[in-house]
Image (cartoon, helix red, strand yellow):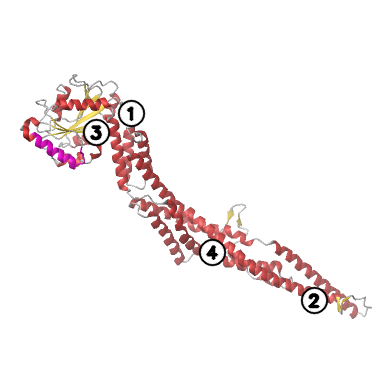
Amino acid sequence: MKLLRRKEGPSLDSRLAALLEAAELAEGRLPADVVSNARAVAERAGVRRSLSVDHTVAALAGATGSGKSSLFNALAGDELAAVGVTRPTTSTAQAALWDGTGAGPLLDWLEIPQRHTPAAVGPDFSGLILLDLPDHDSIRLTHRLEVDRLVELVDLLVWVLDPQKYADAAVHERYLRPLAGHRDVMVVVLNQIDRLPPDAVDRCLRDLRRLLDDDGLAGVPILGASARTGAGLAELRMLLAERVAERRSWSARLSADVSAVADHLADQSAAPLPDAGAVAGLGKPLTDALSEAAGVPLVVAAVRKGHRHRAVVATGWPVTKWVRRFRPDPLRRLRIGTSTTSPEREIVGRTSVPVASAVQKAQVETAIRDVGEAAAGDLAGVWAAAVRQAARSRAVELADAVDRAVATTSLGATKRPRWWRVVGMLQWLVFAVMVAGGLWLGVLFGMDYLRLPQPPLPTLGVVPWPTVLLGGGALVGVVIALLSRLAAWAGGHRRARRVAKALRSAIAQVGAEYVLEPVEGELARHTRFTEAITRARA
């Protein structure tokens, strides 16, 4: 819709969407009243633009005795509002409608029960809805609350001041200064100038200009007028007619509302954009602390010793290797490689690695805190606190996750090399040869004992074959066992290095998932919030 676009920049639709996005992202980070106010402004803007955009709602607001009701009657050309001098006369807002066709839903939303159709006077006011508001300094609280409510809703604000109270701090500090961002939808009228000498009128207008400039309202139109004599009313009518003809006051008001609340959100979280990618550089100290607390050095040492232990059991000399079975397996003592861990079935039990000491736990907590502090950087307090909380958000689950990572990653440490099976079969073959030689010698010994004739005995040189088989088998078996131990020693070191690297990588992934990713997510949320605020303020 063309009316929803300004001359430059994004459309009002996109700015409202950006404001709602910023409010959603700020939920739980910024004060609840600030976020709820942003939502309220966005919702109010959505309602206003869904109502009549062909009508401009202008409100006459002022203090008791400023003559706004008289000015209202003068503009309407009829005695619509009761006029008082020293006490509040207007108790509820009333409206004068010029061509009010289709304005009903808008007035219902504004909750204006008193509606009048004035006489057609002066320039074309077609589409104007002029409101006469209660006094903003009324002694009745309901009057002041009604003014505050409608000041937030109307499209064009016409502040009616009088020569006696135009410098009153109440109107400047409570309304004009906070509404500095709404200068495009504001007009100031110095009423009752007929009570001043001509030279005093100019002085009052210059002084009022100075006060408004101090309030941040430079450029806001100032008109001198008198409802009694009609001075300045023609200029005021022309100005109102121009604003009504433009049909832009409502969108300018909504745009100013969005900018104001977006500025407030930005002030609550002013900070340079953090570099979310820099968080990855904080992972090394965290991984070091987690690895130490998870007993990685102990596991690596157990992998090295366990590899040697299992290699001896698998490739040792059958005559002596059974003794090794009575020694505890270092990996089984840590419950690594047992039947409770099965990556195929994704059932991974806890290890029996000793619980982290108090010092190790403190190191982990310090590393997590350092990640949060470094990532928070120069963020505003609320966002910095959210980043620190994100770093600790999954700390309770961290220990179990690291233990599962150690158990899963260490499963490869129990895998048996193929050469163990080959050497084991060779050892049993050599052992069979040795047993065959021993049995052969036993048979020869029995025949000699029974004085039976000796069968022909083959020899290897001068050594009988049974002796060669027995002694050679024993010697070869011992040699193979020794060589296998040397290979197992080297293999244990290689496997320990691989497992150490794999464990560190797995623990780094756990640290990233449970600590770094929540922090990066919070930083990304802040970045999206800042970008949304930038779009809303554009």
Disc 1/disc 2 C-alpha distance (Å): 106 Å
| Residue 166 appears in the figure | no
Where is residue 136? Give x, y as percent. 17, 36
CB atoms at circles 2 and 3 under 8 Å apart? Answer: no
**Residue 296, label in figure:** 4
Residue at left 43%, top 49%?
A: 521
Q: Which residue is mark 1?
A: 3
CB atoms at circles 4 and 1 under 8 Å apart? Answer: no
Secondary structure under tag 2 reads helix
Q: Nearer the viewer, residue 59 or 252?
A: 252
Amino acid found under the numbered disc labelled 1: Leu
Residue at left 75%, top 65%?
A: 425
> Viewed as shown, does residue 202 lie left or right of 521?
left
> Does residue 71 show up magenta in the picture?
no
Q: Nearer the viewer, mark 1 or mark 2?
A: 1
> Does residue 215 show up magenta in the picture?
yes
Disc 2/disc 3 C-alpha distance (Å): 111 Å
Q: Nearer the viewer, residue 375 or 319?
A: 375
